[in-house]
Image (cartoon, rainbow, N blue to C red):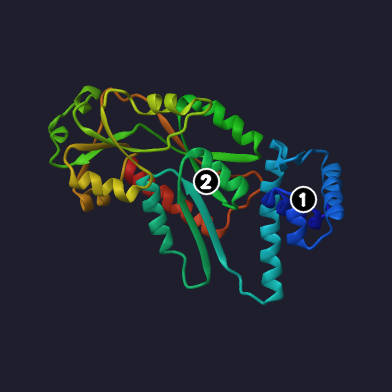
Amino acid sequence: MNILHMKYAVEVAKAGSINKAADILLVAQPNLSRSIKNLEADLGITIFDRSAKGMVLTPEGERFIGYARNILSQIDKVEAMYREGASAVQRFSISGPRASYISDAFARFSATIGTDAAEIFYKETNSMRVISNILTHDYRLGILRYAEMYDRYFKDMLTEKGLVGELITEFRYVLLMRSDSSLASKENLCQADLKNHIEIAHADPFVPNMPAAEVKRTELPDNVERRIFVFERASQFDLLSANPDTFMWVSPAPQKLLDRYGLIQRECVDNTKVYRDVLISRKDYRFTELDRRFIVELERSKMECFA
């Protein structure tokens, strides 16, 4: 497979047109078109659907372009390192759920980076984007969170996409609230107790093969009439600490975080759904020293929060 042809395909995918890509690449349009056809023949797939509207990626093409971007990115980094005499840079990247025990582990891990040059990426998002980040955005590690009932679905997906996973922990969500909330005084909380309170929820839960409305009914029960949706964790703590009528379903959090915001966590007797957090990576990926340091801190934080 010709690396130059791969670069051409990535540029065509970005431009959406042979003509536009040819102008950008300073390559004759017939030569560019021939290069794409040769690449497709070498791979035995159709990368683009051709139409009057331009070049549209096929499903196989989307997967190939994702791999191609990662390969070309690595080539660029190697070329820059040796062409410019750049010093080696420590790199670490992970995306995962909005979980306080993971964030706590990442904060501890940050103290182990040392004084050498480093590029560190940490992104909180939903499970499907975690997978996408590894496949198409050059992230090295990910943490999937899903309900136990979808275990087979996600395991099959990982196998199909050339990824592997290792279980970090299993848990049930707990309720997070201000320490002086009326909910905090109840010894045995149940779903009915939540009805007149405001739920803080993340706005993009994911359940495979289900429409968005059905996802929300599955992940967000209908017994609560008032919800505030957020996309990141910082605002959720501001809301919870400011308003005693709010609560949130979360994975167990570090005690120091609860103390910082004046919060407590309580179990709910009606809550029986088990969730899993799974560390994932490409099948052929070898953990770096930074990866191993993070995993050590992740295990430490897990033991403290889930004990």
Q: Residue at x 73, y 54 (%)?
A: 20
**Secondary element at tag 2:** strand
Q: Quadrant of the C terminus?
A: top left
**Farthest-out residue, front:** 52
Is residue 113 shown left or right of residue 70?
Answer: left
Looking at numbered disc 1 in the image, what kind of residue is underneath it? Ile
List the single residue furthest toward the bottom.
85
Image location of residue 283, percent across then percent down: 65, 43
Q: Report crowding for label 2: few under 14, some 14 to 19, many 20 or more residues within 10 A (C-alpha).
A: many
Q: Residue 249: image x %, image y %?
A: 31, 35
Looking at marks 2 and 1 on the same chain, the residue that comes earlier in the sequence is marked by 1
Relative placement, left or right, of 213 versus 254 is right
Q: Which mark is residue 142?
A: 2
Q: Using the image, determine if residue 215 lies above or below residue 51.
A: above
Please name the residue shown 67% across and 51% down the image: 14
Numbered disc total: 2
Q: What residue lies at 86% left-to-right and 47% top-to-bottom?
A: 38
State the image quarter where residue 63 is shown. top right
Q: Callout 1: helix, strand or loop?
A: helix
Q: Quadrant of residue 157?
A: top right
Report whether residue 7 is seen: no
Q: Is residue 55 left or right of residue 178?
A: right
Q: Nearer the viewer, residue 120 or 235?
A: 235
Q: Which mark is residue 18?
A: 1
Residue 169 can be seen, yes or no: yes
Amino acid type of the residue that numbered disc 2 sits on in the rendered structure: Gly
